[in-house]
Image (cartoon, rainbow, N blue to C red):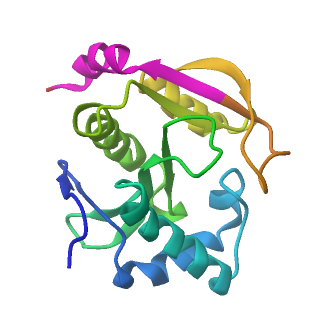
Amino acid sequence: MLNGPLLVTERLILRPPAAEDFDAFAEMSAEEETMRFIGGTAPRASAWRLWCTLAGAWHIRGFSMFSVIERATGEWVGRLGPWEPDGWPGLEIGYGVRAKFAGKGYAFEGTVAACDFAVEFLKWPSLLHTIDPANIRSQALAKRLGARNSGPTRLPEPFHEAPVDAWTQSADEWRINRKAFLP
C-alpha cells in the first residue's frame, strides 16, 4: 500500500518507506562510512526505530524522506527527501545512499526530484541541507544543486554537538538553478 506520492526519474523510483525496504535500510545503518555524517551507525534494533520515524513522519508532517529504488533492479538504494524533525533548523532535503550505490549519481538524481517536490508540491519557500564541514562529498552535491554555505547552524538533541553548516537556497533560486538540469 502506498501511503504518499510516487516520484519517477530516469533511473529511480522515490516512494514512502515500506516494510520490504527495512532489511536494506538496516544494512545501510551499519555501514560506517555511509553513516559517518548522518547520525552514526546503528544496530538493527535502533535502525528499526529510525525507520519507523521516517515512515511515521509521512503521517505526522505530511512529508518525509523517500525510499529510493533502482528502477532497473528494484533494489533499495537509500533514503532522501524532505525532512524537518522537531527543533530542526529549517526545512531540509536530506540524502544518503548505500555504499554500493555511491558515486553513480543516484543521490543527485533523487535529490533533484525531492527538491522539485518540496518547492512545487509542498510549497517550501527555501531548501536546506545540513552538512558536516568535513563531509566533502555532501558539500559537492549541495554545490551541484546550487546551494551555498550560509554558515554554521545547530541541530537539536541528541545531535546538538555535531558540527553542521546550513547549505541553502530559496525556492526561486532553486527554480533558476533547476533549469541547468533540464534536458
Labels in figure, total:
0
Give the residue at x 65% y 54%. 38
The picture places residue 67, in percent across and down from the top left corner, at: 36, 64
Residue 157 against residue 25 in the figure, above or below: above
Instruction: Say whether residue 174 is magenta.
Output: yes
Give the residue at x 51% y 63%. 98
Judging depth in this view, the residue of 137 and 82 nearest the camera is: 82
Quarter holding the N terminus is bottom left
> Would residue 24 be found to the left or right of residue 50 on screen?
left
Instruction: Say whether residue 40 is magenta.
Output: no
Extent of the magenta region: 166-182
Residue 171: image quadrant is: top left
The picture places residue 37, in percent across and down from the top left corner, at: 69, 50
Give the residue at x 47% y 77%. 24
Quarter holding the C terminus is top left
Judging depth in this view, the residue of 83 and 136 nearest the camera is: 83
The picture places residue 163, in percent across and down from the top left corner, at: 80, 38
Give the residue at x 66% y 34%. 136
> Would residue 6 be found to the left or right of residue 77 on screen?
left
